[in-house]
Image (cartoon, helix red, strand yellow):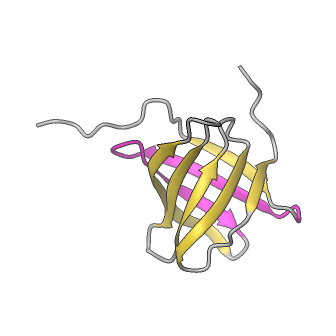
């Protein structure tokens, strides 16, 4: 029996971002999933520790960013999110379902280049 492939370069992590009004968005990524996806929780506005999933990552070869499908595990929302190559900004767009805000957030504590 084979084991599903998980993404080796994604580590469980907690990241804090701010929207343009200084409202905090916290991601707590907890578990890698097959084919490079990830499970976690998001806290933002009325969403408190909402179980979420990202999947179907597509690399943009022009700027190194990745576009993911982003959804609530209960199906409450589904949209796309573009994560900058340094993971310091996220743009939510192309909402397909629900009321997740289509905004840009920036890392409160940016990752430092290695």
Residue bounds of the magenta highlight: 21-44
Viewer-closest of 36 and 41: 36
Magenta: predominant secondary structure element? strand
User: Residue visible at 69% across and 35% down?
Assistant: 86
Q: Residue furthest top?
A: 114
Q: Where is residue 29 in the image (x, y as percent from the top left)?
A: 55, 48
User: Quadrant location of residue 109?
Assistant: top right
User: Quadrant location of residue 2?
Assistant: top left
Look at the image and tell me in which quarter the C terminus lies: top right
Viewer-closest of 27 and 86: 86
Q: Which residue lies furthest to the right in this view?
A: 21
User: Residue visible at 79% across and 38% down?
Assistant: 110
Residue 57 is a magenta residue: no
Residue 41 is a magenta residue: yes
Q: Position of residue 20 (x, y in %)?
A: 86, 62
> Going by the image, does 20 lie left or right of 91?
right
Is the residue 71 above or below the residue 109 in the image? below
Is the residue 63 above or below the residue 83 in the image? above
User: Residue visible at 68% across and 72% down?
Assistant: 101
Count of numbered labels shown in the rendering: 0
Viewer-closest of 34 and 79: 79
Is the residue 44 above or below the residue 67 in the image? below
User: Residue visible at 42% across and 48% down?
Assistant: 37
């Amino acid at each position: 029996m084979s084991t599903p492939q998980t993404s080796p370069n994604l580590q469980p992590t907690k990241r804090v971002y701010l929207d343009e009004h200084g409202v905090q968005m916290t991601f707590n990524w907890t578990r890698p999933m097959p084919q490079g996806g990830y499970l976690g929780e998001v806290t933002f506005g009325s969403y408190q520790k909402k179980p979420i999933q990202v999947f179907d990552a597509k690399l943009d070869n022009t700027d190194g960013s990745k576009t993911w499908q982003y959804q609530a595990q209960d199906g409450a929302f589904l949209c796309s999110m573009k994560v900058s190559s340094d993971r310091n900004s996220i743009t939510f767009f192309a909402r397909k379902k629900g009321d997740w805000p289509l905004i840009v957030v920036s890392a409160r504590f940016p990752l430092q280049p290695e």
